[in-house]
Image (cartoon, grey):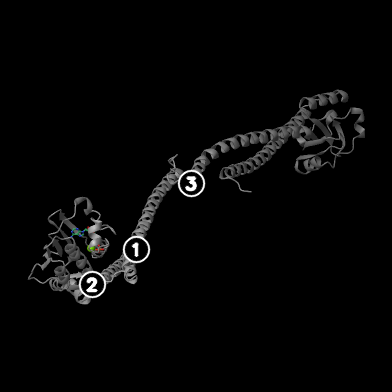
Amino acid sequence: MKLSLRHRLIFVHLLMLLVVTVAGGLIISYQLEDYYESRLFHQLKTHVDEVEYLLAVGAFGTNSLAASYNLLVDYAETVNARLTLIDSLGVVVFESGVKMDSLRFVENHGSRPEVEMAAREGFGGARRLSATVKERLFYAAKKVSPRHRSAGLLAGVEFVRLAVPLDEVEAVLRDLRWKIFGGGGMALLLIALVSYWASSRLTAPIQKLAHVAESVKKGDMEAHFAPESRDEIGELSELLNDMLAKLRDDVKQMRKLQTMRSQFLGNVSHELSTPIFAVQGYLETLLDDKVKDEKLQKSFIEKAYRQTKRLNNLLTDLIDISRIETGDMKMSMRYFEIHEWLTKQITELQATAQQNGITLELTPSNTPVNVLGDRERLAQVLTNLVENAIKYNVTEGRVEVGYKDFVEEIEIFVSDTGRGIPEEHLGRIFERFYRVDRERSRAVGGTGLGLAIVKHIVEAHESHVHVHSQVGKGSTFSFRLKKMGESPLAQIRSQALA
Ligand SMILES: Nc1ncnc2c1ncn2[C@@H]1O[C@H](COP(=O)(O)OP(=O)(O)OP(=O)(O)O)[C@@H](O)[C@H]1O
Ligand SMILES: [Mg+2]
């Protein structure tokens, strides 16, 4: 059976209480019984002493035996006890429970335990069944001391014995026990009620937490754990709220990533299908022998070829992007001389510039500077930037590449006299597949992946791409690279890397 926390708490409380009440009750009632009996015994002893004294002073008379007998009976009734007087041989000479004329039928009391004990020790006590009156009694007996031995009628009395019925004693004790256990029971009931109330107060906030957790489990991310109290449970609900908030953000992020991924996939298939359909179209036209003119045939083939080139570029870009995103694109950092490197890059790009009727220039610089970076990846960056500057330029436009020297870094810039980028697009041109002018971009063979790759590579160099653009005037893209430091350590490092 599954017990709720609350029921378990109550159960444990009650169990503990029960143990305490029962054990406490038992201990108390035993103690009280002990106390009561010792008091009773003490009382009997006092009365026994009293009888001894009264006998000695002759208070019970000296002339008539019958009168003495009656006085003794009266005394026994007054102290509410049975009185027995026994002589040295054990013969009962008086017994308050027996008529005087029947006394001779009473057996010898010499071997009664309390009498034997009194004979031995001066004082004796016992609790047992009386053979004389057939009742359970509590006895106290005393051996009369020689100086109290009275003369006259009661001269032969050796032992004074008093007894009270045990039933009476037990009735009192029973009553006492009832009171103790009754009180305990009441306390148990009361505490059970308090415990029920307290545990429900304690478990109610936990139940509320469980309730909210249940709705979170069902997918309600907006659920909120109300901090009910300022104790551990309150702390727990605050913690859970923090956790939920984090979870909400994570889920939001995950959903955003998911939409981005599906958008990316859509874009990819769209970008791939366009050139594929184009190639298919050109080839079909040629296969159908519809174009007879050889010149036209050749131009179709060229067009198809350009489309396959575009496909190839797109695929390389896609592979780069995915390698960057999976973290597979590792940078291999080396120190290299920037001017020399730029010269080489620009020379390679001159052909493209010329084809587009654009002047491409490298701003001369006479101070050689060593910088840190991955030359191959940086070539990719520069090619992308310069190609953009060429593609989105005006007829007979100019592209200028160069670098500025700063204390710890150099800044490489690619500047063009092109159309510029409208302000509202500036924030988005680094997104994958983002193109300001879709038609123009496609016409010049762009897919919108170039700047996304540029951004990633530059960021891997702990830098970022800066754009300054004015519509109608041109754009400048720039980024920084770390220079080789002058410190001995940096030199050792550069030698190690070189
Ligand atoms: N120098 C520039 N002048 C004007 N517009 C630019 C310039 N560089 C980039 N752009 C704009 O930013 C967009 C994104 O550039 P990006 O290099 O990412 O893509 P793309 O050149 O179209 O394609 P890809 O580089 O993948 O072949 C371009 O489509 C263009 O609209
Ligand atoms: Mg580009």
Is residue 380 something that shows in the picture? yes
Residue designated by label 3: 213
Measured in 3D between alpha carbons, the distance from the residue under mark 1 to the one under mark 2, in whole angstroms, is 27 Å
Tell me the quadrant of ligand 1: bottom left
Q: Does any atom of ligand 1 lie closer than 8 Å to the CB of label 1?
A: no
Q: Secondary structure at mark 3?
A: helix
Where does residue 334 sit, x and y in percent of width and height?
21, 73
Cα distance between the residues tagged 3 and 1:
48 Å
Q: Which quadrant would residue 137 be assigned to in this image?
A: top right
First in residue order: circle 1 vs circle 2: 1
Q: Which image quadrant is residue 109 in?
A: top right
Name the spot of residue 344 as percent of width and height, x first: 15, 74
- Please tell me which residue is depicted at 32% across the width and 70% down the height of the picture: 283
Q: Quadrant of the C terminus?
A: bottom left
Local SS, label 1: helix
Q: Residue 273 has which mark?
A: 1
Instruction: Give the amino acid type for the residue marked by disc 1 in the picture.
Output: Ser
Vertical arrangement, residue 393 with respect to residue 348, above or below: above
Q: Residue 78: give x, y in percent of width and height.
A: 77, 24
Residue type of the residue flagged with mark 3: Ala
The CA distance from mark 2 to mark 3 is: 75 Å
Could you say where residue 80 lies in the image, as x and y percent from the top left?
A: 77, 27
